[in-house]
Amino acid sequence: MPLEIDLSGCRVLVTGGSQGIGRGLAFGFAEAGAEVVVNDISAERADAVAGELRERGGRAVAAVFDVTDYAAVGRAVADAGAGAVDVLINNAGNAGAEGWGSGRARFVETEPTDWERYLQINLYGVMNCAHAVLPSMISRGWGRIITIVSDAGRTGDPGMAAYSAAKAGAAGLTRALAIETGRYGITINNIALGTMRTPATEGMWTDIDHPRVKQTLQRYVVRRPGKPEDVAPLAVFLASQQAEWITGQTYPVNGGFSFAL
Ligand code: NAP
């Protein structure tokens, strides 16, 4: 049986959707027929992506809010501009440049203030968005939440302890929510990424011959960094009706970086 996924009746909210992985997800969902709500803190970039999707014949609107602002998330989701969200993609996050640059620091050298920004966006951002969309999903008896986490949260990443903790926390949160909401026709899963080439990690690729970059890529069975378009096929499938019996799971998309469950 061919796997044909049609999300034409779905409204999908992609947080941090204006660049990198979020942008790839926005395009992937639009191609599957969904209406895409492109969230970001950058109005200019969110508008640009929504405009590009419309130019290609898709349905898309921009929604500018900060996922770490609980009240703003609630207002945006309640707003007619966003409307009822059928599929929430928690993508906004921030390891990126900090992870590969000056922010990579041993835990004992960091302060609670250093941890806060990782926990805010990668964990509280996910909580805020899930809390905003779930009541409507529960009352409508259908919904999907997919959270973009990281190998850092599965295996731990030295020098990125707070990020690793925040991503592991987000994965744990969504597992608990999967149990709470499965009876309402809602599935909630995580996609754990390896190293991806996005604006957040661009600094890493400027010196492809750097020993640390080479060492990192050698850990990938598929010898290349991930691309934003590597993520959408799995996300679209998890959002589909065909995936209704799959919930509470974490799926690696990581070029074979690690095989641990
Ligand atoms: P990215 O290039 O930095 O894109 C993230 C987008 O989210 C940016 O447009 C960013 O805006 C926006 N954003 C930041 N804070 C926000 C907030 N509070 N509310 C709404 N939007 C916000 O990152 P990426 O590399 O595509 O990463 C996307 C996700 O994948 C993250 O959750 C990340 O942790 C995860 N991930 C990435 C990698 C990787 O190697 N890239 C690996 C594993 C997991 P600004 O640019 O203005 O901040």
Image: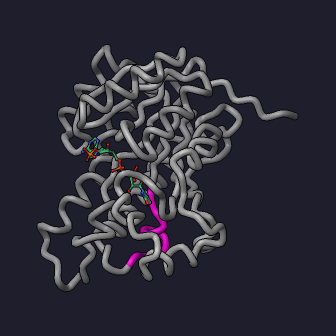
Q: Is residue 168 visible?
A: no
Along the horizontal axis of the image, is 41 left or right of 149?
left
Q: Is residue 54 visible?
A: yes
In the figure, residue 45 lies in which quadrant?
top left
Task: Judge whether 41 appears above or below 100 on screen.
Answer: above
Point out the image quarter for the C terminus: bottom right
Residue 164 pos. (x, y %): 36, 69
- Colour mapping: one colour
Residue 223 pos. (x, y %): 62, 69
Q: Between residues 146 and 114, which one lies in front from this camera angle?
A: 114
**Residue under the image location 38 percent in, 61 percent down:** 167
Residue 208 pos. (x, y %): 46, 70
Span highlighted in magenta in the image: 149-157
Residue 31 pos. (x, y %): 60, 27
In the figure, residue 244 lies in which quadrant?
top right
**Residue under the image location 69 percent in, 29 percent down:** 5
Task: Judge whether 117 appears above or below 234 on screen.
Answer: below
Along the horizontal axis of the image, is 230 left or right of 19?
right
Q: Between residues 189 and 220, which one lies in front from this camera angle?
A: 220
Task: Judge whether 79 appears above or below 187 on screen.
Answer: above
In the figure, residue 40 lies in which quadrant?
top left
**Is residue 160 magenta-colored?**
no
**Residue under the image location 33 percent in, 52 percent down:** 93
**Residue under the image location 59 percent in, 72 percent down:** 220
Along the horizontal axis of the image, is 22 left or right of 99?
right
